[in-house]
Amino acid sequence: MQIQDVELKKLKPWEKNPRVNDNAVDAVIKSITEFGFNVPILCAPNFTIIAGHVRWKAAKKLKLKTVPIVVLELTDAQRHAFSIADNKTAEIATWDFPQLSDILDELTKTEIDIPALGFSETELDRLVASSAVEDFDWSTFEEDSFSTSATPGHVRLLVKIPPEIKDSMKKAIREKAKAIGCSHGDQGVLAGLVFQKLLEDVDG
């Protein structure tokens, strides 16, 4: 695997990229500024981005001239599949919150710019504060509003449904959203808009 530096202007985004990632750009900018551009962008031979769209957007905002890339020889089908898999597999991992909290607490005592890690100020405050509570019940922490991919201006509201109706529920939310004329790239926000409309109809 050969890493090479290329001019940023040569790179082209995958125009059909289904990942909504604009909310992550500022966090990646902080990371690049603090730690450097340490993860190459993966590209096809024609410089179409396969994985690394957020890093590319961050590089543009930082006005970088060149970025590190790795060229992958893949068919179009393989390129599209890998791009989706790269994003989806990242969602599967979860946090060991006690361990994470301890590490963050240690890092606050160093010169590391903690906000560059990507957590919101609220998330960091709660994680560090929770580590100071003896015998803290982390199971309740995992189930509440904590989210490393929070959408600015929104909070998470925990809703639990039987697994067998998950797909039908998602379909119903999409259909209702279309019927009331609302849309959003974040499915959680979309569901919130639908529930808000339903509650308004009930109150009315």
Image: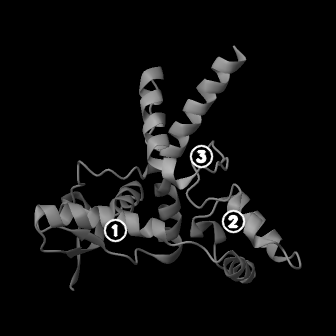
Q: In this rendering, does residue 187 appear at all?
A: yes
Q: Using a 10 Å C-alpha cutoff, classify the residue at mark 3 as few (fewer than 14 neighbours), some (14 to 19) or many (20 or more).
A: few
State which tag comes first along the sequence, 2 or 3: 2
Q: Amino acid at mark 3?
A: Pro
**Residue 9 as seen in the image, left or right of residue 137:** left
Is disc 2 placed on a helix, strand or loop?
helix
Measuring 71% from the left and 57% from the top, which residue is drawn there? 144
Q: CA distance from mark 2 to mark 3?
A: 20 Å
**Residue 159 as seen in the image, left or right of residue 27:** right
Mark 2 — residue? 142
Q: Is residue 178 above or below residue 41?
A: above
Q: Amino acid at mark 1?
A: Asp
Q: Which quarter of the figure has residue 145?
A: bottom right
Between marks 3 and 1 in the image, the one whose residue lies nearer the viewer: 1
Which residue in the rendered view is the most extreme toward the front? 164
Please give the label number shown on residue 152.
3
Measuring 84% from the left and 74% from the top, which residue is drawn there? 136
Q: Is residue 99 above or below residue 87?
A: below
User: In the rendering, at what x and y percent does residue 62 appear?
Assistant: 42, 59
Measuring 32% from the left and 66% from the top, which residue is drawn there? 85
User: In the rendering, at what x and y percent does residue 182 appear?
Assistant: 47, 27
Is disc 1 placed on a helix, strand or loop?
helix
Mark 3 and mark 2 in contact (Cβ < 8 Å)?
Answer: no
Mark 1 — residue? 86
Q: Using a 10 Å C-alpha cutoff, classify the residue at mark 2 as few (fewer than 14 neighbours), some (14 to 19) or many (20 or more).
A: some
Measuring 68% from the left and 82% from the top, which residue is drawn there? 99
**Residue 148 as seen in the image, left or right of residue 47:** right
User: In the rendering, at what x and y percent does residue 80 appear?
Assistant: 21, 60
**Residue 17 as seen in the image, left or right of residue 151:** left
Q: Amino acid at mark 2?
A: Glu
